Image (spheres, rainbow, N blue to C red):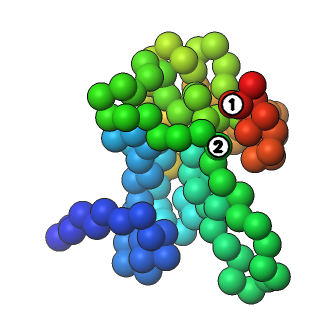
């Protein structure tokens, strides 16, 4: 038996679900077991969401925000998360990439044209401030 649970509260998802599908702009961008997705996010949007959460055990610090704004549902760009992503490449702005199994993690899927490079660390994550500089330029 299954029950879909839709929430913006990742704590609720972590407590209540076994699997999670992270969505951006009405499209699924990452799917997998809750523990693995929350412990090692693969898609840049999932990483941004988790980076925006406060650290409950550490000192109070300024939260990292995903730069830019979510596009209106009737004005979604032809690509993916590209307008708000630090790793955007030309291919990212043409069409949404399909969900693909992650290298070395076939039970995990992400919709990112650059997922192999991101997953293996060949294209290290840029900081939120670098992303903000790129998106506001």
**Cβ atoms under marks 2 and 1 closer than 8 Å:** yes
Relative to 25, say whether 52 is above or below.
below
Q: CA distance from mark 2 to mark 1?
A: 7 Å
Question: Residue at the spot x=39%, y=27% of the render?
Answer: 76
Determine the image quadrant of residue 24.
top left
Residue 136 visible in the snapshot: yes
Q: Please state if 61 lies on the left or on the right of 38 as rendered.
A: right
Give the numbered dot on residue 126: none
- Give coordinates of residue 25: x percent, y percent: 40, 39
Q: Quadrant of the C terminus?
A: top right
Query: Residue 90: x, y in percent?
Result: 63, 13
Left or right, 125 with respect to 54, comes to right
Of residue 13 and residue 103, the one placed in the foreground of this image is 13
Q: Answer few, some or many: residues within 10 Å of disc 2's Cα (few below 14, many 20 plus, some between 14 and 19).
A: many
Does 35 appear above or below 72? below
Question: On the image, numbered disc 2 is attached to which residue?
Answer: 67
* Mark 1 residue element: helix
Q: Residue farthest to the left?
A: 1
In this view, which residue lies farthest toward the front?
A: 136
Residue visible at 63% across and 48% down in the picture: 66
Residue pictured at 17% horizontal, 70% vertical: 1
At horizontal 36% and vertical 65% (from top left) the residue drawn is 7
Instruction: Point out the tag, 2 or 1, that comes first from the N-terminus.
Output: 2
The crowd level at tag 1 (other Cα within 10 Å; few <14, some 14-19, many 20+) is some
Give the number of the disc on residue 135.
Answer: 1
Look at the numbered disc 2 and give the secondary structure of its residue: loop
Q: At which x and y percent is residue 116? A: 66, 32
Q: Is residue 136 left or right of residue 94?
A: right
> Residue 79: x and y, percent?
48, 22
Q: Is residue 129 above or below residue 19?
A: above
């Amino acid at each position: 038996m299954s029950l879909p649970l839709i929430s913006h509260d990742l704590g609720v998802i972590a407590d209540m679900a076994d699997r999670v599908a992270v969505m951006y702009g009405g499209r699924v961008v990452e799917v997998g077991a809750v523990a693995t997705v929350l412990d090692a996010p693969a898609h840049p949007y999932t990483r941004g969401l988790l980076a925006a959460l406060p650290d409950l055990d550490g000192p109070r610090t300024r939260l990292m925000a995903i730069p830019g704004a979510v596009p209106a549902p009737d004005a979604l760009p032809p690509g993916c998360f590209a307008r708000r992503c630090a790793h955007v490449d030309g291919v990212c702005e043409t069409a949404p990439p399909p969900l693909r199994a992650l290298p070395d993690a076939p039970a995990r899927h992400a919709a990112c044209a650059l997922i192999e490079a991101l997953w293996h660390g060949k294209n290290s994550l840029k900081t939120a401030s670098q992303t903000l500089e790129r998106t506001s330029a």
